[in-house]
Amino acid sequence: MSGTTDCCQDCLHYMFDYETPKTLVIPSIRVGFMFRFTQLLVVLYVVGYVCVVQKAYQETDSVISSVTTKVKGFAFTNTSDMDPRLWDVADYVIPPQGAQSFFVLTNMVITPKQTQSRCPELPSPSTTCVDDCDCIEGHNDPRGSGIQTGLCVNYSSTAQTCEVLSWCPLEIDTKLPEHALLAAAENFTVLIKNSITYPKFKFHRRNIMPHINSSYLKMCEFNHATDPDCPIFRLKHIVSGAGEEFQDIAVKGGIIGITIDWSCDLDWWAGKCYPMYSFRRLDDKHPVRNVAPGYNFRFTKYFKTPNGEETRTLIKAYGIRFDVIVFGTAGKFSIVPTVVNLGAGLSFLSLVPIVCDWFMLTCTRKRDLYSRHKITYLSDNADTESMSMGTTYGTH
Amino acid sequence: MSGTTDCCQDCLHYMFDYETPKTLVIPSIRVGFMFRFTQLLVVLYVVGYVCVVQKAYQETDSVISSVTTKVKGFAFTNTSDMDPRLWDVADYVIPPQGAQSFFVLTNMVITPKQTQSRCPELPSPSTTCVDDCDCIEGHNDPRGSGIQTGLCVNYSSTAQTCEVLSWCPLEIDTKLPEHALLAAAENFTVLIKNSITYPKFKFHRRNIMPHINSSYLKMCEFNHATDPDCPIFRLKHIVSGAGEEFQDIAVKGGIIGITIDWSCDLDWWAGKCYPMYSFRRLDDKHPVRNVAPGYNFRFTKYFKTPNGEETRTLIKAYGIRFDVIVFGTAGKFSIVPTVVNLGAGLSFLSLVPIVCDWFMLTCTRKRDLYSRHKITYLSDNADTESMSMGTTYGTH
Amino acid sequence: MSGTTDCCQDCLHYMFDYETPKTLVIPSIRVGFMFRFTQLLVVLYVVGYVCVVQKAYQETDSVISSVTTKVKGFAFTNTSDMDPRLWDVADYVIPPQGAQSFFVLTNMVITPKQTQSRCPELPSPSTTCVDDCDCIEGHNDPRGSGIQTGLCVNYSSTAQTCEVLSWCPLEIDTKLPEHALLAAAENFTVLIKNSITYPKFKFHRRNIMPHINSSYLKMCEFNHATDPDCPIFRLKHIVSGAGEEFQDIAVKGGIIGITIDWSCDLDWWAGKCYPMYSFRRLDDKHPVRNVAPGYNFRFTKYFKTPNGEETRTLIKAYGIRFDVIVFGTAGKFSIVPTVVNLGAGLSFLSLVPIVCDWFMLTCTRKRDLYSRHKITYLSDNADTESMSMGTTYGTH
């Protein structure tokens, strides 16, 4: 029983005896100052750079967003090719739903009254022919416009081309108007409504800020300097904000990104969370190393003639696609990143004594004295129990 | 040669002599207990909070998603304005493709048989006129409906307004039906198929879970409590899940977010990864500080009259846009965040002796004894070699 | 005054006296080697795994992207149901805008000349009838095709079904062509233009790399092995890259994801940032536990008959939806994650002496000698000042 008690006592001692290093206090101002100064540097780095500048004490979340857009304005065209015509939103915004990405038609090549029929190919080295032998019935040239019928017919008074089965007459898209047809589109406005969420922080917000009232919204127009909160943008200003000229880009089309940056600091002492708008051209306007510059697509309106035949109007639409791109990261104080970053800083504090010890034992005048008192050398031949503290000094 | 050997030996000593602090063991239960207790607190924090609650040992990835939607149902309308008419999916879902965001038409203002022609403006303070002098030919009022022709014509028997060149007759959108035309849309259902990927973990999943069979899918309907895995939603329940009344929102339209939260814990011992659905209204229904409340857009159907003239039906469509918003973060054990978080925790363990030493040398009864044995003071005047261990105690 | 001076001196001493642990140097190769070896392991882990393999010294950002797509090609159909017909991009790509997600029509069920009228329901157990009593006027069966008129009429010479008010004639979508109508779609090509941004690093790039010239772009075709930089893809190769057979998927439709991985290392010594394309089927082709397999939707073309009646062509479109999915994370050296990860590694270095002390005091031959010199035990009865260093050794 006495053995058990001993064992328990040993355990208790093992658990609760406090083992602490013996220390030597050195009254050297130089070494002490160096120690404190190095400590200060580390603390300043951790507090200053990591915490204040980089906000490393925050956990972060990415934005989730929903966007609605609504374009307003109309344009009047009166060219020799077409009847005078008024274009309203339903005509020039495609698709009409007002989604995150919307397209404003600015220029076009219209090919009306196309029907499934036969017509001569557009002249090109591979389609010109002399007689029917040059055209292969059923041939399907990926760069052509349809299936060859095997006949060689007159394209014009001077040229003969293979006949194809296709939507005829064929589109001639080389005659693109040099000045954008809907040049007036530069004065259209777009209202952008954006609702965002940071799900981790259960934080919702809209780009129409609470302090804005309806009457202001009815007449305002976005301006970086004077009206940074107004959600109504003039297309011309968006394009010029992206460093482009509206009338240039309107001819062949392009893609303009409207980026909304919702970088937020959600800590109560900061409470900074509002949208920052910026504009940038997304497609490559560089003429070299580019393919299909500008932005265009073809769409159709289908009609039926009174006798039931299907006919269509093909429109090659050039215009500006506006992509509303919402991004952002919200940060909020959280214990985990704080602990991780403070802990990492503390680790560096543990390097400070190593540096100071090295300095003390190498660079100070009294280094031998310090060394003698700080460090005890166990001599190699101290195998026997006869070794004593005294010898340590002696052998050194 | 003997010098080289010495040098090498010195180097070896420098490399492989082990320097370890001399320590003092203090048999004080109070100090020992405090030491162990503080250690325990730090370990509990690191293991408990960082690892278990915050799962800081995981690396994370963001979800990538693809969504398909398919609405089912039809509605029958029989109002005085229109012929009796059946509306099916192809009529009321715009765009028809079943994308991430789909729109269900619930109310509308239809203006049929518009042609490019001349008609009197809608009466308003700026458009009423007395004679032709009040109207400027070619004037383009952004708030008007078209280009003024310069004539003042009869709008009704009592009012005269400027004539405009536009799509005539003009749309009168003030007569919006008070009860949604397609009120029956509340019983439509939508099937949402969602396929997600966490690219970093090469993890793919669909919202139709493996344990669900076809027969269940054909008849089930989503319900938070009873059928949380069914991917078929009734529109009415989506809207009420967002805290709104379907018949209210159907009149002027709105945007409802269907959020699918794919927060996953991919560690094999957790293996939790299934979609959580929730619903929220995304647009601002607040009548004040709002612009263009509700959700609507205009689209057209183009027709040709037998004599080749283009005519269109303009539809101002009010309805509910449903945005399927998929988000989520997957976590999986990874060595790097584990090491970083454990390392940070260890740093705090190194603070424990500092706290305990301070306690021992300040608050215990035997602090002088402990201090005397733990700390050796090098006296200021220990410049000479004659200083001895004994003086340390004496000068203190 | 002398007291103040003393106090100040005490303060200075407290601030600038340097306290350093007394250490014992042990000339044991085994312990020393173990110490250095363990240190090396920790350093190797931190430098090797954390820094080199996991690049934990980088801060990261998620990609923001804008996509344009442009399909090219045409197909010719000549079936018994339809007139010979050429299909071009404007016919088979829906929507036409060339967005991130585009649909190529490959198969269809066309129901032309539908009008709002009355016709017998499609026969099914719930719609067949014997006389008018079986049909309820105004009944709206969600699985039916319209509103019942209450009459029982002849569907064919053998079957009678309830009459409904609907878009008539009704679509019969059970007769889907077994071979895809637009089988030729496999040879269509698509040009994908992708512009990305890493906002945190203000880094922009396009998937058409600077070293590619226009002439190459005009004739190249993407191939993982030979042309990994060409942005023009043949639909057949996309589908086969996803492990599917084009002609199989074309019949009932499906969704193919084109993922562009922009994982970038933006450090100047790495400078690796180019798109990696891969393809994957996103919908579930598994026939069991599936609902509505494949991918289809219905859309309409609206016409007006010469007498002003609205008629429509309903097209149930089967085809392949291609979703361009852009993801990626860019990493760049940053001081904060570097400090955090180095700090965490340093913490583990502080564990090394603990391990070595334990080894030295437990496993070495001279453990008693080491222990005697390293550790001083304050005896329990050392309450009196008479205790001396010597007793420590003695009581042990």
Image: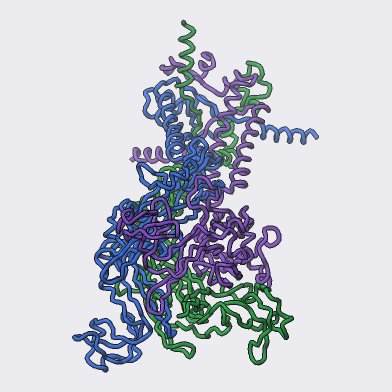
Chain colours: A purple, B green, C blue
Say whether residue A337 is visible.
yes
Q: Is residue B344 left or right of residue B163?
A: left
Q: Nearer the viewer, residue C74 or B246?
A: C74
Q: Which of B4 and A380 is in front in this view?
A: B4
- Measured as percent of width and height from the top left, residue B319 is found at 49, 76
Residue lying farthest right? C1
Q: Tell me the quadrant of the picture where the C terminus of chain C can be found.
A: top left
Q: Which quadrant would residue C178 be assigned to in this image?
A: bottom left
Q: Tell me the quadrant of the picture where the N terminus of chain C can be found.
A: top right
Residue at 65% across, 33% down = A37
Residue lying farthest front? A157
Say whether residue B340 is visible.
no
Q: Is residue A103 left or right of residue B202?
A: right
Q: Which of B363 and C112 is in front in this view?
A: C112
Q: Which quadrant would residue C29 be assigned to in this image?
A: top left
Relative vertical location of residue A200 with respect to residue A339 in this rendering, above or below: below
Q: Which of A271 and C138 is in front in this view?
A: C138
